[in-house]
Image (cartoon, coloured by chain):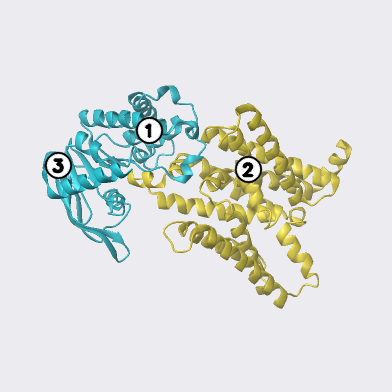
Amino acid sequence: MLEKLLFYMNYPFVRYALIVGVLIALCSSFLGVTLVLKRFSFIGDGLSHVAFGAMAIGTVLDLSDNMLIVLPVTVVCAILLLRTGRNTKIKGDAVIAMISVGALAFGYLLMNIFSTSSNLTGDVCSTLFGSTSILTLTKSEVWLCVALSIAVVLIFIFFYNKIFAVTFDEDFSKASGVNADLYNLLIAVVIAVIIVLAMNLVGSLLISALIIFPALSAMRLFKSFKSVTVFSAVLSVICALTGLLISILGGTPVGSTIVAVDVGAFLICYVTGFVAGGVRR
Amino acid sequence: MALLTVKDLSLGYESEVIAQGINFSVNEGDYLCVVGENGSGKSTLMKALLHLKEPIKGEIIYGDGLKRNETGYLPQQTLIQKDFPASVKEIVLSGCQGRCGIRPFYSSEHKKLAKMNMERMGITSLSDRCYRELSGGQQQRVLLARALCATQKLILLDEPVAGLDPLVTEQMYELISNLNKEGITIIMISHDLGAALSYASNILHIGNSIFFGTREEYAESGVGKSFLALRKGGEADA
């Protein structure tokens, strides 16, 4: 088995996939805790569908680089979604559902009407489930991913305390003079970047899993924000790595394998938490 | 000059006015209790005082060099906080956030301040415990310690005893009263008229009729008498 692995490691695309996979898993786990606590678990789903729609527009317009349209559109939607979470007539979850389903439908419609590809179902399937895209990364895409990941990690460390304060109690933070709106905006932008990145790895449909599972697993076991954050990052990386290796060796689809490992880890954490600390509400 | 002066304030949502003609002032060391029926605009008034909401009309003037980040706030518990994985230490420390400005991390001074306020509230032994596993009274102490980290001058409390049992409620009132004796100005929203009359120095009643004055004046006033009678009747029914 090891020989087989080493054999695969000779191929650059396998190495790229491992690097990108680990980085995306790391980034996506960071904001997971915040999103789950803010009751925005589904934002990953909503935004990834937006990114899918934007990607369809890019394909129809025949842009050389889809990123040019996908990233800005997703960032704008993330800002709108997190803003409308409060004080609006349509509540956060309903807005997410609307945007998510709408973007998915329009994306597919556009691809269907204007597509030049002969294998439309295959295209859609790979965008949604990311079945092959991580194995077809180019060197420049890997570098882009590395750069954005480093930026996300730095931003998160730098604003860690502020993100904590704003997530725990927005009103208190505002009252004591913290610019909560600015940090909410920052969170939205970072989430959008992470989602666009993660689309390469697991595809639109499974991004939510990558964001929420490590956070939920960590919340079963740990009691402070810091330990939850650190553990979810570590767990996410381990799961992504395991999933990638399994899929390389076993020839299973990358995204679904990683998510399956994440689900398994969650179950283990759930049982451990149950046994160790009794039932936690 | 007063710490806080409110002139002809109108509050409401969008175009609907829920309270108007509110005038009062708070001096340093005061203990002001805001009472009134449900929906009379008590919480909205609090939000306006904290700059969380723009008033429809009127003005709020901060005096005595009270800066915006020198107000502590004890909000009502939100749903998010009920299952938030955070230790007591982390939450109390987050009260210093307003002092940090653009600084990314807390200084040792902030940590000292957090420790001192945890001692003050008698929760030092809980500092590594998880917030969601604490009792209601302990949680309120944690949030009060956090508010103390944000201010040494003025604390606004929104129903600090909601959901607490009578004994813990009494302890909470004592704690707040002690803070007031140490020189911190208190503005508290309360349903509990009995407590308001025994602890507060001034009372603001908002609703159909507005009253502002000392607690003795309130007990003698028409508004106070009718509200008291209403409350007593309500309690007798229950």
- Spot the residue most to the front: B237
Under circle 3, the secondary element is: helix
Question: How far is the residue under mark 1 from the one under mark 3?
Answer: 26 Å
Closest to the observer, A265 or B23: B23
Where is residue A169 shown, x and y percent of the image?
A: 42, 44
**How far apart are the two marked residues, 2 and 3, measured between alpha carbons?**
62 Å
Quadrant, the C terminus of chain A? top right
As drawn, the chain in cyan is: B
Q: Which residue is mark 2?
A: A26
Residue A95 horizontal side relative to residue A109, left or right: left
Q: Which residue is mark 1?
A: B165
In which quadrant of the rendered view does residue B174 lie? top left
Left or right of B136 on screen, residue B233: left
Confirm whether residue A10 shows in the render: no
Determine the CA span between mark 2 and mark 1. Answer: 44 Å
* Mark toward the viewer: 2 or 1: 1
Q: Is residue A170 visible?
A: yes
The amino acid at mark 3 is Ala
Q: Which chain is yellow?
A: A
Q: Position of residue B24 (x, y in %)?
A: 16, 49
Q: Is circle 1 on the same chain as circle 3?
A: yes
Are the residues under marks 2 and 1 on the same chain? Answer: no
Residue count near mark 2 (Cα–Cα under 10 Å), binned few <14, some 14–19, many ≥20: many
SS for dot 1: loop
